[in-house]
Amino acid sequence: MKYKKHTIANRIFNVIGGLLLAFTCFFCSFLFYKNSEIDLKNVDKFEGQIIDRGITAYYTSTSAPYKYTFIKNVFYLKIKGLDQILGVYNTKQFYTTLENNLLLGDTILVHYKKSKQVNKLNLATIQIEKNKRIVLNSKEFKGKESLAFYLSFLGGCLLLTLTYFNDKKFR
């Protein structure tokens, strides 16, 4: 009898855990989808002069028990009068175009999503314009968000499938 209770408890735990993780993936995919369909008319805009810019290290880390820190290079911008430091992440780590086109003292128009954490680098920079010319296109931001949407949606579907077949073993 004790073995059977243990098996039922494992089954319930596995199903609830699998469904919770799948729901988390689907919720994240919804957020990524919303970001990929973002309209420039509905985001924050700021026009100002560049007072600092360059490439800096951006640290992200995984959670315990096996904590690992990832270091990525990010292009950053400080704009006079803006309370946030804006950043642009490129998966190929190629920032030459931004470095050559965005110089100290240039006046630019930035489309971004305002962050509540003003002391942290804001990577939600959607589009940058200089002299009515687009330097950073919103298609890059939307493309990254679309990829994240597809990956998280696929992950949710995979988790649901694995949860179903794992539970099927106990029936």
Image: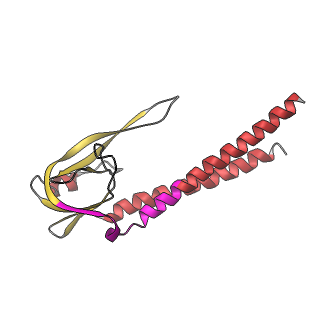
Q: Quadrant of the N terminus?
A: top right
Q: Is residue 30 magenta?
A: yes
Q: Is residue 48 left or right of residue 65?
A: left
User: Residue 109's quadrant in the figure?
Assistant: bottom left
Residue 83 in the image: state x and y as whole percent: 23, 50
Q: Residue at x 36, y 69 (%)?
A: 39
Q: Is residue 136 visible?
A: no
In the rendered image of this protein, does residue 160 appear above or below residue 120?
below
In the rendered image of this protein, does residue 136 appear above or below residue 75?
below
Q: Is residue 9 magenta?
A: no
Q: Is residue 46 visible?
A: yes
Q: Residue at x 41, y 57 (%)?
A: 144
Indicate how the structure is coloured in the image: secondary structure
Secondary structure character of the magenta stretch overall:
helix
Q: Residue at x 56, y 57 (%)?
A: 153
Residue 41 in the image: state x and y as whole percent: 32, 71
Tally of numbered tags: 0
In the rendered image of this protein, does residue 27 appear above or below residue 10?
below
Outermost residue toward the right in this view: 1
In the rendered image of this protein, does residue 150 appear above or below residue 118?
below
Residue 97 in the image: state x and y as whole percent: 21, 56
Q: Is residue 89 left or right of residue 133?
A: right
The segment highlighted magenta reads 28-47
